[in-house]
Image: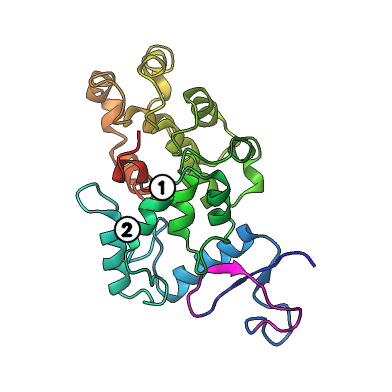
Amino acid sequence: MARKYHINPKTGVPTICRAKKGKCPYQGAFGTDNHYDTYSEAQAVSLEYFRTKYNFLHWEGGEKMINHTLSQPYDEQLTEAIKGGLSSEIEKDADVHKVHEEIMNCKDSDKLMRIINGIEFPDMDWTKVGIALQNPNLPEEFMRRIVDYTDNFHIETVRLFIRNHAISGNVLISIGMSEDDDMLVRCLAFQSPAIGDDYAKYVLKNHREELTELPWLALVENKYLEEGVFDEFKQTQEYADTANLRKQLHEDLNRYPQWWIRYGIN
């Protein structure tokens, strides 16, 4: 029998259904309710669960959304958000930070895949998945599949993965320039520290007219680039006219925390 995933109604998170056919307590009146063929499908339903029941989502809107900053540890923000209205059953770890740090520092590629597939933890959630997706020790074949076949993955999976330090600058540039990919994915690609100064200067010299548009505006705001590389451009009226666009861009980008900074991973 093919593996199925269900949403635990007590926690709102997807897990593998290990019950015998017809015996799952979460299957509903028709015997197939709340069950999905892939973990990605179950994750999408999980997102909607948090959005509608708690008006909360870590990185996509909601009054209780975490606005990640380096001045406050991510796990503290998560704890505050939970106290603010998220079900206490969602996070039962005695030390949430310790679990997150363990995932980010994990060098076992098989374990990382078990985390992403909802096998490693009994109550999987998007935070643990997000950390695992940004771990540079993911299997190369899996990372290649995300880059080459983004349509086969949930969009949140791709958006979280795109900040993985294992992705090369050339690949990120290719994604940033691709009109076929999600705009936020393209912006996140141009925000990566792997985008070098040489490429930024090349764009400034040869594609200046595009720098007030997304995703190129994300490149202008890339804090990892050489200081001053875009200073002259930032004095132009064209750049001043993009104030509202930049504000929205920053809000969108900040919803995707950079866990490697939190744990000092280069």
Judge left or right: residue 159 versus residue 143: left
Q: Which mark is residue 69?
A: none
The reply to whether the C-beta atoms of the residues labelled 2 and 1 are less than 8 Å apart is: no
Quadrant location, the N terminus: bottom right
Number of the label disc, if any, that sits on residue 97: 2
Q: Amino acid at mark 2?
A: His
Name which residue lies at 38% across and 12% down.
205
Say which residue appears at 23% left-offset and 19% top-offset.
Answer: 228
| Figure quadrant of residue 61 | bottom left
Indicate left or right for 204 with 109 as reference.
Answer: left
> Which residue corresponds to mark 1?
104
Circle nearer the N terminus (2, 1): 2
Q: Secondary structure at mark 1?
A: helix
* Residue 235 % position (x, y): 22, 23
Amino acid type, mark 1: Met
| Residue at the extreme front | 108
Q: Is residue 149 left or right of residue 246?
A: right
Could you say which quadrant of the image residue 87 lies in? bottom left
Residue 67 in sight here:
no
Regarding mark 2 in the picture, which secondary structure is present there? helix
Q: Is residue 21 above or below residue 221?
A: below
Q: Is residue 150 visible?
A: yes
> Image height check: is 229 above or below 53?
above
Residue numbers of the magenta segment: 10-24
Color theme of the render: rainbow
Judging depth in this view, the residue of 28 and 207 nearest the camera is 28
Measure how far apart labels 2 and 1 are at the Cα level: 11 Å
Query: Quick check: 40 above or below 18?
Result: above
Q: Is residue 218 magenta?
A: no
Is 63 placed above or below 158 here?
Answer: below
